[in-house]
Image (cartoon, rainbow, N blue to C red):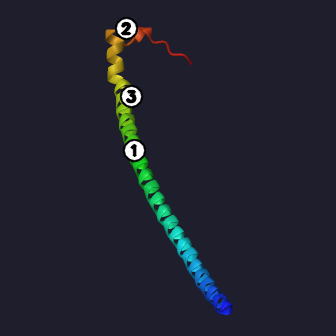
Amino acid sequence: MPIVKVARSRTHLDTREGTGLKVSSFTLAVCVLVAAALLYVWSHLKNTQLKYQMAEEISIRDSLQEESRKLKVEIATLKSPKRIEAIAREKLNMSYPEREQVILIK
């Protein structure tokens, strides 16, 4: 009778070892799948975050380009010869020199 018990216990141990290997393989496979899913979700979130940052930077760039365009128009207006001549005549009381006031230097 003891021989039968030994045979049963060995058969029982072999079954456990096989199941243990299957469970550890299954656990490893589940861990790999979870890690892959987490990596996919993280990369998707990072991609979305970068797209929002790009949209914000593009918006800032567009507003700065608009401001630059307005400043260029303002500079062109302030440099206008007609405007400068009007300021010279009205505020500084300047006028074109008379013919006798012009001296040619050679």
The image quadrant of residue 71 is top left
x 40%, y 37%: residue: 64
The 10 Å Cα crowd at callout 3, few under 14, some 14 to 19, many 20 or more, is few
Secondary structure under the numbered disc 2 in the rendered image: loop
Residue type pointed to by label 1: Glu
The image quadrant of residue 44 is bottom left
Q: CA distance from mark 2 to mark 1?
A: 48 Å
x 53%, y 75%: residue: 26
Residue 3 at x, y percent in the picture = 68, 92
Q: Earlier in the sequence, mark 2 or mark 3?
A: 3
Residue of label 2: 92
Mark 2 vs mark 1: give the one in front: 1
Residue 5 at x, y percent in the picture = 64, 88
Residue of label 3: 75
Residue of label 1: 56
Q: CA distance from mark 2 to mark 3?
A: 21 Å
x 37%, y 8%: residue: 92
> Relative to residue 94, is residue 24 drawn left or right?
right
Q: Is residue 67 above or below residue 82?
A: below
